[in-house]
Amino acid sequence: MLPPGSLVEQVEAVLAQDLPAIVRAGHPVLRRPARDFDGQLDDVTLGRLISTMRRVMHEAPGVGLAAPQIGIPLRIAVLEDRGVADPAVAEARARTPLPFTVLINPSYEADAGGTAAFYEGCLSVPGYQAVVERPARITATYTQPGGITVTTGFEGWPARIVQHETDHLNGQLYLDRAVLRSLTADAEHGRWAQPTVDAARRGLGF
Ligand code: ZN
């Protein structure tokens, strides 16, 4: 028997669901810094958790998911982005494909290279998008599932995804950093779907 209320028991309860539900803004798990992963789960359970997170991310669909978004307070996130079909959008946003990546205990620092401001959304805040200005280039340090810790650079859209997911693990939502006047319901976002946010800046006054 697992000790009741233990992290392992919590993970097993989530993994027992067919498709774990994504928790939404307002749940305190999204507002507390997650705990470092330091071997609380054995390799098999960690692997099951990662593959479940990947499945939840694909089904949503989204390009990143942090463990707290399925109610697990550990510093683990998964990322994967196939990019976008429209070459003008891909170029303006530097949205290059990001292969499946697992971040364990990640941190990042901004590098020189300025900032980029684009619309961003979150699976835990459905129905809305807002502009977030973020460093365009970062250096991230994280551990991979095999236990190797790497320090590597990200730029463009992949850098944005790494920042968004790492922020989740620090108890932050993208809205904490967003330009609130840019807030757009999905139903209105079509009018601002240009490659850049210039028209939205003029139209919404931010
Ligand atoms: Zn999110």
Image (cartoon, rainbow, N blue to C red):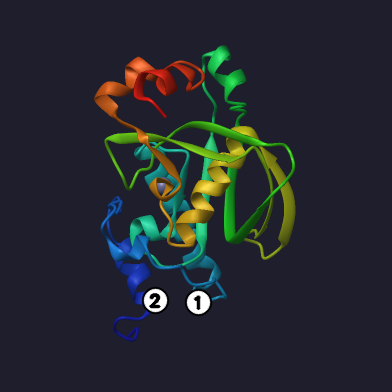
* Secondary structure under the numbered disc 2 in the rendered image: helix
Toward the viewer: 100 or 151?
Answer: 151
Mark 2 crowd level (few <14, some 14–19, many ≥20, 10 Å Cα)? some
Q: Residue furthest front?
A: 205
Q: Answer above or below: position of 8 versus 15.
A: below
Task: Name the foreground residue: 184 vs 64.
Answer: 184
**Quarter of the rendering occupied by the N terminus:** bottom left
Can residue 15 be seen?
Answer: no
Q: Locate residue 100, reporting x and y percent.
A: 57, 42
Q: Which residue is mark 1?
A: 40
**Mark 1–mark 2 CB contact (< 8 Å):** yes
Asked if residue 8 lies left or right of residue 117, the reply is left
Say which quadrant the C terminus sits in: top left
- In percent of width and height, residue 138 lies at 68, 46
Occupied quadrant, residue 38: bottom right
Q: CA distance from mark 1 to mark 2?
A: 8 Å
Q: Which residue is mark 2?
A: 7
Mark number, residue 116: none
Quadrant in the picture for residue 194: top left
Q: Amino acid at mark 1?
A: Gln
| Dot placed on the residue nearer the N-terminal end, 1 or 2 | 2
The residue positioned 29% from the left and 67% from the top of the image is 13
Left or right of 80, for residue 139: right
Q: Is residue 22 visible?
A: yes
Q: Is residue 95 above or below residue 18?
A: above
Could you tell me which residue is drawn at 54 percent across and 29 percent down?
Answer: 82
In the image, residue 184 above or below residue 148: above
